[in-house]
Image (cartoon, rainbow, N blue to C red):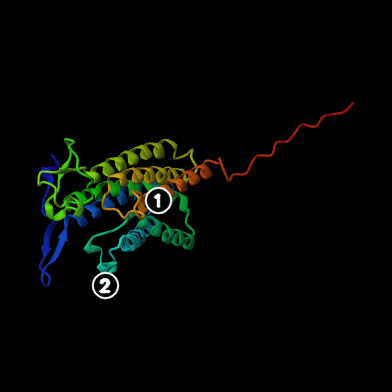
């Protein structure tokens, strides 16, 4: 079934100079962001916050996120022994050349948005709650761009839902395998996990919007996002590992994000960091 959806990665070419190719990957990523933005704009207004501030922050987050995602990817690629690929600054920041790390992008964008929110004196937790769900649905849609590019696949499998990968898109360790070899559709696994997380948190957000402190949904998002990415890493042979181990840098980042999510959730529900109520003992009257 998935094989029938395969198509040329280039959607169309704009006749500028030698031709400017527009890729399906970019279109699908943009579609995911648009879907998330439409929902997010409505949700932030339900919370009594400014949709204008939300969209301004979204633009900043997208651009800064992609920059940090690219820089993180390059850093990990260099650590993996591929530093010769980046002979100039243009090679480093050229996102069209392929290669981004969304975990690094998220951390970088989160720092930028924290500074922006502090400057604008925004209630950051409301926006964080909404941003978490936006990321889930946008990334779930965007992962199908990886399918079009025949990337983000796992090791060989004989499972019926395995996908074929054309020889020119295979990793070096899979280059000599038979042409009919099928691989784990890692992009699909992550897309489904992200969608499940989105709908679960969407329900919780609607059910407890007026009861939970703002920031609680964001904490739960971090937990889900970190844990699912940690699991997905076992199906990512393209990731840079630490030394000769099977542990990837992204695994560690994912666990850190999940741990921060646990901390944020516990703080926002008042389990830690909250003020304890004073217990006033009744006075004993002496007769």
Query: In which quadrant will I find the N terminus?
Result: top left
**CA neighbours of label 1 inside 10 A, class few (<14), some (14 to 19), many (20+):** some
Q: Which residue is mark 1?
A: 252
The answer to whether residue 55 of the structure is visible from this angle is no
Which residue occupies the foreground of this view, 179 or 104?
Answer: 179
Q: Position of residue 65 (x, y in %)?
A: 34, 59
Residue at the far right: name it.
Answer: 287
Where residue 9 sits, quadrant-wise, is bottom left
Q: Position of residue 103 (x, y in %)?
A: 36, 54
Which callout, 1 or 2, points at the residue further toward the start of the chain? 2
The answer to whether residue 104 of the structure is visible from this angle is yes
Question: What label sits on residue 45 in the rendered view?
Answer: none
- Compared across the picture, whether 73 is left or right of 204 comes to left
Q: Position of residue 118 (x, y in %)?
A: 49, 60
Q: Which residue is mark 2?
A: 87
Identify the element where label 2 is drawn. loop
Residue at horizontal 31 percent and vertical 60 percent from the top: 80
Residue at horizontal 38 percent and vertical 59 percent from the top: 109
- Compared across the picture, whether 156 is left or right of 65 comes to left
**CA neighbours of label 2 inside 10 A, class few (<14), some (14 to 19), many (20+):** few
Disc 1 versus disc 2: distance between alpha carbons?
28 Å
Identify the element where label 1 is drawn. helix
Determine whether 219 is above or below 282 in the image. Answer: below
Which residue occupies the foreground of this view, 203 or 48?
Answer: 203
Which residue occupies the foreground of this view, 193 or 207?
Answer: 193
Query: In which quadrant will I find the C terminus?
Result: top right
């Amino acid at each position: 079934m998935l094989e029938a959806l395969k198509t040329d990665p280039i959607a169309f070419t704009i006749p500028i100079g030698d031709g400017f190719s527009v890729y399906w990957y970019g279109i699908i990523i943009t579609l995911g962001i648009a879907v998330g933005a439409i929902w997010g704009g409505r949700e932030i207004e339900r919370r009594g916050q400014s949709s204008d501030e939300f969209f301004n922050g979204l633009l900043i987050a997208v651009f800064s996120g992609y920059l940090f995602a690219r820089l993180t990817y390059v850093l990990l690629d260099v650590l993996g022994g591929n530093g010769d690929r980046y002979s100039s600054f243009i090679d480093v920041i050229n996102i069209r050349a392929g290669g981004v790390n969304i975990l690094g992008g998220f951390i970088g964008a989160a720092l930028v948005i924290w500074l922006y929110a502090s400057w604008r004196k925004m209630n950051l937790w409301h926006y964080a709650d909404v941003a978490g769900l936006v990321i889930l649905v946008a990334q779930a849609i965007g992962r199908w761009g990886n399918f079009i590019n025949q990337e983000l696949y796992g090791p060989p499998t004989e499972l019926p839902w395995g996908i074929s990968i054309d020889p020119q898109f295979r990793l070096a360790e899979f280059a000599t395998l038979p042409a009919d070899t099928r691989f784990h559709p890692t992009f699909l696994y992550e897309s489904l996990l992200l969608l499940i997380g989105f709908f679960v948190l969407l329900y919780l957000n609607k059910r407890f919007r007026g009861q939970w402190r703002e920031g609680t949904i964001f904490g739960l998002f971090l937990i889900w996002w970190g844990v699912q990415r940690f699991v997905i890493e076992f199906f990512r042979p393209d990731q840079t590992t630490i030394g000769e181990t099977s542990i990837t840098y992204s695994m560690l980042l994912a666990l850190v994000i999940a741990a921060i999510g646990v901390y944020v959730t516990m703080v926002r529900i008042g389990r830690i960091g909250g003020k304890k109520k004073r217990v006033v003992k009744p006075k004993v009257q002496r007769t």
